Image: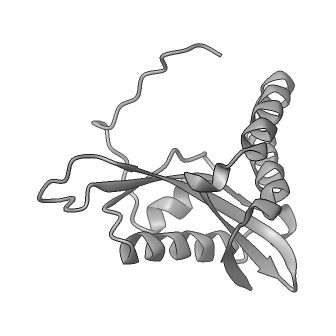
Amino acid sequence: MKIREATKDDSKWILHHRINMFIDMDESSDYIRETKVLTESYLAGDWYRDYRYFLVEDSNQVIGGCGISQFRVPPQKSQKRGVYAYLTNMFVEHNHRNKGVGRALLRHVIKLCTDEGIGLLLLHASDVGLPLYESEGFKSSQKLMHLRTMDY
């Protein structure tokens, strides 16, 4: 098993993982259809400038992936570089689940963030993914809030 950073030529895998992740989360067919169109448009552009995606391969077959988007805030004592990352689209193909693939991918991203001085890694967990994230040290916070500024 090897993990590598995706290139523009790997865009099809990002779309595949993203759509199948939402299918697994029981999103509506309308939601999935619109998300597919929006994601295809995003991937047709220069997505790799602000989004990093990582693929897991086994025997030259892609079996999973996830991405991070980085953003900056003014530095502070606990975040000296002021760089955070948001993890998205964690997905492992069904026949490779519960074999450590997701854990290896997550650990890869955590190490990358640590090595690059990214002070905080954020995510929204699905019910299925929550135990994995908690076992790797992620904590839920009642103070981290969000506001949806547009309806969909």
The spot of residue 105 in percent (x, y) is: 61, 72
Residue at 65 percent across and 69 percent down: it is 102
Left or right, residue 52 beside residue 24: left
The spot of residue 20 in percent (x, y) is: 81, 47
Any part of residue 133 in sight: yes
Q: Quadrant of the N terminus?
A: bottom right
Which residue reaches farthest left? 77
Residue at 54 percent across and 76 percent down: it is 108
Q: Quadrant of the C terminus?
A: top right
Left or right, residue 99 beside residue 71: right
Any part of residue 100 in sight: no
Q: Quadrant of residue 106?
A: bottom right
Left or right, residue 94 beside residue 80: right
The spot of residue 12 in percent (x, y) is: 85, 55
Which residue reaches farthest top? 151
Q: Quadrant of residue 9?
A: bottom right
Residue at 59 percent across and 72 percent down: it is 103
Q: In this figure, what is the number of numbered marks?
A: 0
Residue at 84 percent across and 62 percent down: it is 94
Q: Nearer the viewer, residue 22 or 33?
A: 33
Name the colouring of the figure: one colour
Q: Nearer the viewer, residue 70 or 55?
A: 70
